[in-house]
Image (tube, helix red, strand yellow):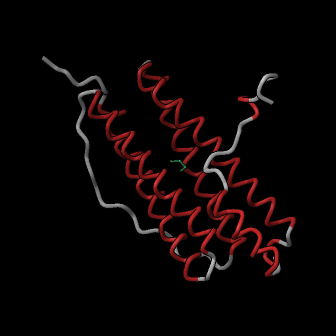
Amino acid sequence: MDTNRLSQTLASALNEQMTKEAHAAQIYLSYAAWADSQGFGGIANFLFRHAHEERNHMMKILEYILKRGAIVKVTAIPAPPKDPENVHHCFEKVFEHEVDNTKAVYKLVKMSLTEEDWATWNFMQWFVKEQTEEETLALNLLDKIKIAGGEKINSDALYTLDRDLEKTPDDARLAQDVTAENP
Ligand code: OFO
């Protein structure tokens, strides 16, 4: 009796996505280490927390593949890109990585729709929402940095940003979650 509930195509796409989330964790980890070495402890803390979140995403997919009776393939994780040039560049890259991951998530949603695999389609909706939150968060931070001068951000503004990021919540609120009771 075949107990595998995932098609070959979806199983391998989910495995790829699992590695992509692990790669995202490595990117955040390396940017966090870079930020700390530059003296930005608050930014580093924010990025370290995010590395942890990405690893949780990897685990979420791994558990889903197992639950559906398919095979998990743990492979090598590509190396993260080189260090950012400055704080502005760091968050530009963070935003780019998030958009890139969103595209991969959308691909999986489309594949599950085509295959009429509603369990996977439903599972992927969590990632769609998560990516929207992460893009919003990265965009909000980029906006703040741009207002403070972008690449030419001065040390006072950097100091404030670093201090604020130490306590910045890991998720952004989305417009679609706003209600009259909870504006
Ligand atoms: Fe995995 O959430 Fe961003 O990339």
> At which x and y percent is residue 32?
54, 70
- The location of residue 46, given as percent across then percent down, is 59, 62
Judging depth in this view, the residue of 56 and 74 nearest the camera is 56
Is 9 placed left or right of 54 in the picture? left
Residue at image position (48%, 66%) is 29
Q: Where is residue 38 in the image (x, y as percent from the top left)?
A: 61, 82
Residue furthest to the left in view is 1
Name the residue: 58% across, 44% down: 102
The residue shown at (24%, 32%) is 70
Give the quarter of the image for residue 172. top right
Q: With respect to residue 62, does 45 lie above or below? A: below
Residue 93 in the figure: left or right of residue 78: right
The vertical placement of 183 against 151, above or below, is above
Say left or right for 36 vs 56: right
Q: Quadrant of residue 35?
A: bottom right
Q: Where is residue 131 in the image (x, y as percent from the top left)?
A: 59, 43
**Compared with residue 58, is residue 124 higher up or lower down, i.e. above or below?**
above
Q: Foreground: 121 or 158? A: 158
Residue 131 visible in the snapshot? yes
Image quadrant occupied by the C terminus? top right
Q: Residue at x 57, y 69 (%)?
A: 44
- One can see residue 13 in this view: no
Image quarter of the N terminus: top left
Residue 102 or residue 132, whichever sits in front: 132
**In this rendering, is residue 73 above or below 157?**
above
Badge count: 0
